[in-house]
């Protein structure tokens, strides 16, 4: 699904974002058809240059966007930004609260120019006692209970992806969608706020409610009492690993029959799931011994043929070769800003049976500056003067 068929075709978003949270919001709206204009400093979004775990940030969260490089600290740069915003439906940002106000690009300033404008702010905290603090995904995972739940007792561990940044950006996009729907009724825009800490609290809310219901504190996931008897990673033949699950009495009967575990099937101590949970201390070692003679592929085949849940232990890079993703169009061809070719996962849903696709590769720094300024009414002479005054780049660099 591309072009005018997408639900937000005709919506313009101007974003002042960096890192992951804000760019995720724009990526979602862009994937759904919006024209997303990314305003970058002349040196570019810092994520263009990150190493290690940050190397994938820019290409993942900045597809389907156009790049305009401006020096917003100059009057001419601010004027250019305002002229781009004048044609926008949504402005999105994820800087410290004072940053946008100093630039005169905060919501209170912009709403005076256009009462239909929707303004999305992505912050560390929603307004309250913590809103002055600097937050990061890992900060809120530590203070919001997620790292406690992920790690072993006494060893808090962050989740293995930028879960709060990504979900916080998604909630920003959801808020923008709600504001667009509200604008259809009222004719007026509004400010939307999304925050890392509150997002993290939403993620661990199930454990908060577990305590509310049972009166017992949730144990960290590695030490938890599982709700199901068989719900574990098993090390099997040749040291391979596989996750296997048997989560109902019906599945237990199927599992025992598939592996000829007749005695276990008839053991009264294992009659129900809760019985088996109470028997885990001796049941799981016994099952580990029984299953260790099989390879992971053999176990996976038996589980799949019998409709039982299982999963290979997969590394992220292995997903490029996943037959399901490749067979269903879940990975789209993408050209990196430096010209290399790769593939990228699309949004995880379909509209009318199609995945929202890739219309624009992650942009080179300032790639669309000239075209968008001309569209905003700048002449070639105006643009040349902006170049001479170092308000915009003289020309987009070839591989950045």
Image (cartoon, rainbow, N blue to C red):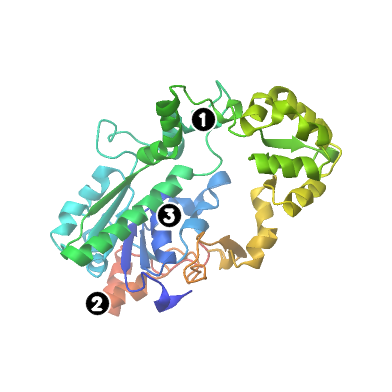
Q: Is residue 286 visible?
A: yes
Percent across and percent down for residue 370 are: 35, 73
On the image, numbered disc 2 is attached to which residue? 377
Q: Nearer the viewer, residue 16 or 122?
A: 122
What kind of element bears circle 3? helix
What kind of element bears circle 2? loop
- In the displayed structure, would residue 208 be above or below residue 96? above
Mark 2–mark 1 contact, CB under 8 Å? no
Q: Is residue 137 left or right of residue 121?
A: right
Question: Which badge, 2 or 1, comes first in the chain's sequence?
Answer: 1
On the image, numbered disc 3 is attached to which residue? 24
- In the displayed structure, would residue 170 be above or below residue 388? above
On the image, numbered disc 1 is attached to which residue? 149
Residue drawn at x 57%, y 27% as measured from the top left: 224
Percent across and percent down for residue 355 are: 52, 67
Crowd around label 2: few <14 · some 14–19 · many ≥20 (10 Å): few
Q: Nearer the viewer, residue 141 or 304?
A: 304
CA distance for labels 3 and 1? 25 Å
Crowd around label 3: few <14 · some 14–19 · many ≥20 (10 Å): many
Question: Which badge, 3 or 1, comes first in the chain's sequence?
Answer: 3
Residue drawn at x 18%, y 58% as measured from the top left: 110
What kind of element bears circle 1? helix
**Which quarter of the figure has residue 130?**
top left
Residue drawn at x 73%, y 41% as measured from the top left: 253
């Amino acid at each position: 699904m591309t072009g005018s068929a997408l639900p937000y075709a005709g919506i313009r978003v101007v974003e002042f974002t960096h890192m992951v949270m804000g760019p995720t919001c724009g990526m979602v709206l862009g994937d759904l058809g919006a024209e997303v204009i990314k305003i970058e400093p002349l040196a570019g979004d810092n994520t263009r240059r990150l190493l290690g775990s940050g190397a994938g940030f820019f290409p993942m969260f900045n597809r389907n966007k156009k790049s305009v490089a401006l020096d917003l600290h100059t009057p001419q740069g601010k004027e250019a930004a305002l002229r781009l915003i004048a044609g926008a439906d949504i402005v999105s940002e994820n800087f410290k609260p004072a940053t946008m106000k100093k630039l005169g690009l905060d919501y209170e300033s912009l709403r005076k120019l256009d009462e239909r404008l929707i303004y999305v702010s992505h912050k560390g905290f929603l307004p309250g006692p913590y809103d002055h603090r600097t937050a990061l995904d890992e900060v809120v995972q530590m203070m919001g209970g997620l790292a406690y739940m992920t790690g072993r007792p006494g060893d808090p561990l962050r989740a293995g992806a930028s879960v709060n940044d990504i979900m916080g950006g998604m909630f920003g996009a959801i808020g923008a969608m709600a504001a667009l729907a509200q604008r259809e009724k009222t004719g007026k825009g509004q400010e939307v706020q999304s925050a890392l800490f509150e997002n993290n609290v939403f993620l661990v809310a199930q454990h908060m409610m577990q305590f509310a219901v049972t009166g017992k504190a949730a144990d960290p996931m590695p030490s938890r009492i599982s709700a199901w008897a068989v719900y574990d990673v098993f090390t099997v033949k040749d040291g391979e690993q596989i996750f296997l699950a048997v989560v109902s009495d019906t599945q237990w009967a199927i599992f025992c029959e598939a592996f000829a575990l007749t005695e276990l099937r008839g053991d009264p101590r294992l009659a129900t799931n809760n019985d088996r949970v109470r028997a885990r201390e001796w049941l799981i070692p016994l099952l580990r011994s029984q299953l260790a003679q099989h390879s992971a592929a053999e176990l996976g085949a038996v589980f799949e043929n019998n409709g039982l849940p299982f999963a290979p232990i997969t590394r992220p890079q292995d997903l490029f070769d996943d037959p399901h993703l490749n067979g269903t169009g879940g990975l789209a061809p993408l050209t990196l800003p430096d010209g290399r070719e790769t593939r990228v996962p699309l949004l995880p849903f379909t509209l009318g049976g199609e995945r929202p696709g890739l219309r624009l590769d992650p942009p080179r720094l300032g790639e669309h500056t000239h075209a968008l300024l001309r569209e905003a009414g700048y002449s070639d002479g105006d643009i040349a003067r902006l170049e001479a005054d170092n308000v915009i780049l003289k020309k987009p660099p070839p591989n950045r």
